[in-house]
Amino acid sequence: MPNRVRVFAPATVSNLGPGFDILGLALARPGDLVEAETRAAPGVEIVAVTGASVLSTDPAKNVAGVAAAAALRRLDGRAPGDPVTPSRGVRLWLHKQMPLASGLGSSAASSVAGALAAIAAHGATLSKHDLIACALEGERAAAGAAHADNVAPGVMGGIVLIRSYQPLDLISLPVPAALRVVVVHPHCEVVTAEARKLVSAHRFDIRQVITNLGNVAALVDALHRGTLDQLGRSIADALVEPLRAPLVPGFDAVKQAASDAGARGCSLSGSGPSVFAFAESETDAARIGAAMRAAFQSAAHLDSDVYLGPVNTHGARVL
Amino acid sequence: MPNRVRVFAPATVSNLGPGFDILGLALARPGDLVEAETRAAPGVEIVAVTGASVLSTDPAKNVAGVAAAAALRRLDGRAPGDPVTPSRGVRLWLHKQMPLASGLGSSAASSVAGALAAIAAHGATLSKHDLIACALEGERAAAGAAHADNVAPGVMGGIVLIRSYQPLDLISLPVPAALRVVVVHPHCEVVTAEARKLVSAHRFDIRQVITNLGNVAALVDALHRGTLDQLGRSIADALVEPLRAPLVPGFDAVKQAASDAGARGCSLSGSGPSVFAFAESETDAARIGAAMRAAFQSAAHLDSDVYLGPVNTHGARVL
């Protein structure tokens, strides 16, 4: 009987305020769990999906299956996106343990977990760069384009800067030891494709651009220095947040509540509706999370889930 | 007879590729020299201007005079831009030792030198923040708007990040010890106001913005790590250089020559026509400067001056 491996891949917060499409970080929780076994037949089989009834068990229509197939092709020495069946086979069980369409990189978590589980079931390893390339095939299947700002931190852990997409140039940024992340997920949905279209259809004035350039530069500087007050001042987005915030009921009130409770910056997580904030301690994080949750309730009558913790510095891993 | 002080303020390179309006650095040379003496009558007198026949000796029409008056008002406890005559008086001699309209912050160098000389003649000091605010009055007189990306490095030295203009939030970035700057000034002019208009009238696509966000973040990371290869990859500007480069004859050939000669990045200095490049050593800098100079000659039949050296880490100073 084949050995079964279990892989956890974390939820991720992308953009981090000023860094649209170029910054992301990994959370300690939530995340997705994928189990995998080898099988004799080539290709990927998805035996079961738990935790999300809308997801397909067709491996060509499930990002975990798409990414797993890409990873097996990589083991064959092929390009991850090569449209051929890999020579090896795996069976997958996908346990969704995080919300879909939440702005927390749900498809990226499944993609990363699927790719890593397929590799691990065969007792093999891939470089992080290769693993990211394989998981990006899952993202491409989900979003029509391969955005690395969830997949890269999901694989690498920590806070990741994507300097360039062509060629892919990834930089792990320092994570201040005291830094805590608060994520509040209100029970509503933002369709990522629509949120992206708002941005791609827009044309930006140089003044807006200058604001984000200054803030993203100061954000990186603050991570190197460990100055969380400067980090907080740098979490300001003049480009994308003004376009997307109207899609999230209560956003302004939640952001104000985070600030009043002492947050070191607050903005949308990815395309929302989740909202993240930074904090200087566990205690601060708990107080900020409670204030944000209360604001979603009072301003928009929305229940929400709160996740608190340090940045996940190891990324996806075999359990 | 009053004591005469002499002040040197350096030329500066702004933008540094991806950092439009938010990054600047100070050069070892060229720069401007201002001499100053107190006088009994209140207000500023410009006794002489050498090195630039087009500049006025009317202190209200010369940025050194405007900035000097602002600095004297600051000594009175007033706002630098307060439209009143200061209670103290100075006489100034402005020695332009750098080209006008060169993209090297000529008006900023005169403003900074004027403000610091006026203060020093009275045996007083101002904080760097106050000195910058006073010099910005000179910039406002020259350009109609107060851009700090030349003035701030001129005062502070080093490489300066302007996170925010309102309020002014300045951050000194680390300067890698091996870093050398090459600046080549071709003998032609770009009118700053026209070069700015090209940018302010333009609307930018998010893809262009993402390119600059990734590069400016990686640039700051590279300065902290001292990784000059990464710094070089980060000197890429998808926003402004494509609009302004056509104003500089031979730019593409000069940039290619810099790259071929081993430059760690090359772009316009400010609004041009000067072009800067980074290098890893004095030897590399000399080779790169010669190659860029030759390219201006062969591609555009333009003579040019080459300045080489480390980043000026002390900024403007009393000699």
Image (cartoon, coloured by chain):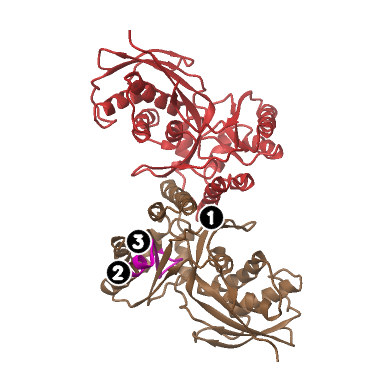
Chain colours: A brown, B red
What type is the residue that disc 2 sits on? Ala
The answer to whether marks 3 and 2 sit on the same chain is yes
Above or below, B21 relative to A121? above
The residue at the point 64 percent across, 41 percent down is B264
* Residue B183 shows in the view: no
Which kind of residue does numbered mark 1 sit on?
A: Arg
Q: Amino acid at mark 3?
A: Ala
Identify which residue, B267 or B116, lies in the foreground.
B116
- Label 2 to label 1, Cα distance in Å? 35 Å
**Which of these two is toward me, B295 or A3?**
A3
Q: Where are the magenta residues, as a range?
A: A268-287
Measuring from the top left, give residue B116's x and y in whole percent.
38, 25
Label 3 resides on the chain identified as A
Q: Residues within 10 Å of mark 2 (few under 14, many from 20)?
A: many
Determine the image quadrant of residue A186: bottom left
Q: Which label number is shown at residue A108?
A: none
Q: Is residue B145 above or below residue A19?
A: above
Residue labelled with disc 3: A263
Residue A177 shows in this picture:
yes
The mark lying in front, picked from 2 and 1, is 2
Q: Where is mark 2, residue-wise?
A: A291
**Closer to the camera: disc 1 or disc 3?**
3
- Name the residue tied to disc 1: B207
